[in-house]
Amino acid sequence: MAGTQRYIRYILIAFLCLIIVYFISSTSDPRDQLQSATDYIKSHSGSLTAHRDDEDEAPLPGLDDERPPIPLETGARTLPSALEDTDTTPNKPNELPPAVASGERMNATFVTLARNSDVWEIAESIRQVEDRFNRKYNYDWVFLNDNEFDEQFKRVTTALVSGKTKYGTIPKDHWSYPEWIDQDKAAKVRDEMREKKVIYGDSVSYRHMCRYESGFFFRHPLMLDYEWYWRVEPSIKLFCDINYDTFKFMAENKKKYSFVISLYEYVETIPTLWDSTKRWMEKHPDQVAEGNSMKFVSDDGGKTYNHCHFWSNFEIGNLNWLRGQAYMDYFDQLDKDGGFFYERWGDAPVHSVAAALMLKKEEIHFFNDISYYHVPFTHCPTGDDFRMDHKCHCNPSENFDWNGYSCTKRFFEVNDMELPKGWQQEQH
Ligand SMILES: Nc1nc2c(ncn2[C@@H]2O[C@H](COP(=O)(O)OP(=O)(O)OP(=O)(O)O)[C@@H](O)[C@H]2O)c(=O)[nH]1
Ligand SMILES: *[C@@H]1O[C@H](CO)[C@@H](O)[C@H](O)[C@H]1NC(C)=O
Ligand SMILES: [Mg+2]
């Protein structure tokens, strides 16, 4: 009996050893394969970049032309299939993820106004902007707040931004009632707007925010170091790759202001904005540009406002224009008239009317290639080819451009621009 038991035990141990030997040999296998893939590449075309250059079409503007060769270790995974010419699914990448773009940088920064409680929503936005654009350009990012930023906000945002981050507190007098404002009158307006359910109509902080974005952010000491800005808000999305320096584009094409979405403003929030605007025009006729975009904001040659505006939660613009005499005179007129508090003027119509009247129409740019979402609207470029080429992930049926509430078609008309093919199919 005891002999048989020992015999069985020997067999079991031997079997176990066999399993262990098999296990060790099979786990070392992939390493062998990787080794041989590397050898394979070495014995073939030499480097991945050399191979890819044959296939590349004309490079996109601003893309780094001298891409560093891909290290063989990482190339090994994708290379064999590329060499054997079997297509990847669903298509071959038409370019490698570019490293940091070469060349000079513009005097530019991102800028975000936010509360500490916005940290996760702004983190989402930063990640989108970095992935689609800024990881190649590493521009700085300025954060502004009416309270001091806390450690968590700074840690999270610093970790996500590829450029330098700067944190500014807003001086009290840029975020409070000017002395000429009758605060009881302002409070009554807020009550009325609450009754009428005007969006943010009863909010004090929203009004300070709109006034700040209209007249102060570009004068913050941290912003004085820059000439160009790109405004980013919490919870936005970017849907397409941006493979060129948008700031450089603005400078080289003499643009001062830009947009991606335009629409009609709620009338209840700006009933007298145009009256104030006319007061400024009468006082400063010289500040109204020749060849401006009056037709974008007025249907009757300037008698009334048609409520069209560029949506300012996205902006790429020139800070020196905003800091200039004309814009400052315009803002001072509006601020004196009190509509930021007696009504609920938004910074979007304020920036838009200013841009439309004091810039030449060629100085305003529609960034069709910056596909963008801010609740509840999407700009998704019209045209399949464009979207594929730029690796867009927006749903074209959600494009707002040709919707009846959008003013973008009007912008095209004012500027004698041809509407893109297929716009009629997207008029939802
Ligand atoms: N520091 C600070 N930032 C604010 C305050 N209110 C709004 N903001 C910021 O100002 C910008 C605009 O505010 P939003 O709340 O996004 O206003 P909106 O875009 O009109 O509306 P929704 O995005 O639809 O809520 C965002 O970047 C906010 O983070 C505030 O009281 N303090
Ligand atoms: C950037 O622009 C600002 C504002 O025009 C200017 O004061 C500053 O000197 C510029 N910085 C550089 C490096 O050119
Ligand atoms: Mg917002």
Image (cartoon, helix red, strand yellow):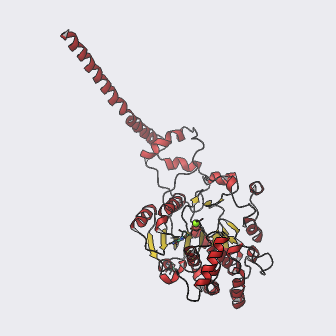
Of all residues shown, which one is farthest toward the top?
1
Q: Quadrant of the C terminus?
A: bottom right
49 is higher (above) or lower (below) than 420:
above
Q: From the top left corner, tell me how far across and down residue 185 is, in percent.
A: 62, 83
Q: From the top left corner, tell me how far across and down residue 218 is, in percent.
A: 54, 78
Q: Is residue 247 left or right of residue 414?
A: left
Q: From the top left corner, tell me how far across and down residue 331 is, in percent.
A: 62, 83
Image-quadrant location for residue 295 = bottom right
Between 412 and 47, the one lying in front of the other is 412
At x 72% / y 66%, what residue is drawn?
Answer: 408
Between 75 and 235, the one lying in front of the other is 235
Of all residues shown, which one is farthest toward the bottom?
283
Q: Is residue 199 left or right of residue 408?
A: left
At x 59% / y 78%, what residue is drawn?
Answer: 214
Q: Is residue 230 left or right of residue 363?
A: left
Q: Is residue 246 left or right of residue 76?
A: right
Q: Quadrant of the N terminus?
A: top left
Q: From the top left corner, tell me how far across and down residue 422 is, in percent.
A: 75, 55
Of all residues shown, which one is farthest toward the right?
300
282 is higher (above) or lower (below) than 123:
below
Count the marks: how many?
A: 0
Between 154 and 181, the one lying in front of the other is 181
Image-quadrant location for residue 169 = bottom left
At x 75% / y 65%, what residue is drawn?
Answer: 409
Q: Quadrant of ligand 3?
A: bottom right
Can you see residue 13?
yes
Image-quadrant location for residue 345 = bottom right
Can you see residue 136?
no
